């Protein structure tokens, strides 16, 4: 059974703009007697973690976080987070276009394609599935031309469905914005009414979840 997720709930964006965090791969590292290391990880995708306390500047902002904490029932339910360091199909300061990322290649029968973002440095690359795109921002391209119709997006999964299967060899691309699915990873029982004004805010930890 899938864990509950609040599709319509976004962590307050004016708070998330000051959030610290990012991706992490838990690594098992063993140092050998020779001084060399054996390194391994058991996951293929990183899990992102964040601390939102740095973005809370007023009592009103703290209250917004508390409201979300209540409706999410603490650590039980997931919700969306805008990671300002990486929320677009290209660099955060660049406006997305319909040719930013490869979506796939048509084969004449497949109608569904998962949004994916590619990260590359030289010959090295990494592919990240985008599961929580922002509805209304996603653009789709076919052989370099933007499609205004003939496709739909499931914003809860990041799957694009074409009305008709793209022809064999057709180049499919996309661009747009996306969120990170997260949950609270903390308790908020140490907050007082003075917290937001004295600068002594406890950690407000958020952890990426698999969806």
Image: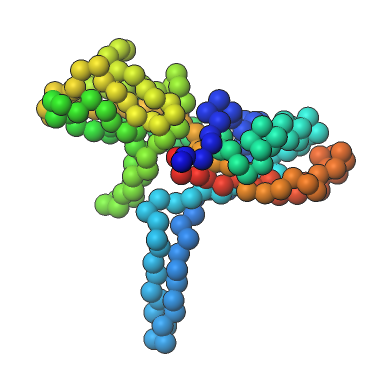
Which residue is drawn at the image coordinates 53% and 34% (left, top)?
Answer: 5
- Please say if 9 is above or below 19: above
Asked if residue 193 lies left or right of residue 176, the reply is right
The residue furthest top is 149
Nearer to me, 80 or 137? 80
Does residue 85 appear in this view?
A: no
Which residue is drawn at the image coordinates 39% and 79% (left, top)?
Answer: 36
Where does the image place residue 63, in percent across and percent down from the top left?
76, 32
Nearer to me, 202 or 68? 68
Which image quadrant is residue 194 in?
A: top right
Which residue is drawn at the image coordinates 42% and 87% (left, top)?
Answer: 33
Does residue 6 appear in this view?
A: yes
Where does the image place residue 118, in percent across and percent down from the top left?
34, 41
Asked if residue 143 lies left or right of residue 136, the reply is left
Where does the image place residue 122, in percent across and percent down from the top left?
30, 51
- Please say if 50 is above or below 100: below
The C terminus lies in quadrant: top left
């Amino acid at each position: 059974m899938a864990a509950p997720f609040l599709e319509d709930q976004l962590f307050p964006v004016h708070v998330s703009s000051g959030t610290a965090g990012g991706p992490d791969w838990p690594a098992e590292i063993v140092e050998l007697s020779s001084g060399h290391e054996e390194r391994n990880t058991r996951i293929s995708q990183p899990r992102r973690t964040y601390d939102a306390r740095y973005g809370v500047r007023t009592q009103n902002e703290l209250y917004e976080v508390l409201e979300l904490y209540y409706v999410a029932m603490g650590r039980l339910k997931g919700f969306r987070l805008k990671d300002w360091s990486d929320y677009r199909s290209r660099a955060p300061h660049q406006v997305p276009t319909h040719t930013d990322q490869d979506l796939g290649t048509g084969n004449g029968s497949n109608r569904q394609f998962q949004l994916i973002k590619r990260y590359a440095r030289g010959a090295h690359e990494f592919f990240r599935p985008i599961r929580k795109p922002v509805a209304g921002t996603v653009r789709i391209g076919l052989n370099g031309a933007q499609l205004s119709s003939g496709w739909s997006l499931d914003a809860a999964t990041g799957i694009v469905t074409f009305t008709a299967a793209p022809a064999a060899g057709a180049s499919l691309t996309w661009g747009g914005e996306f969120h990170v699915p997260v949950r609270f990873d903390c308790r908020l029982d140490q907050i007082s009414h003075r917290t937001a004004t004295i600068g002594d805010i406890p950690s407000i930890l958020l952890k990426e979840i698999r969806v």
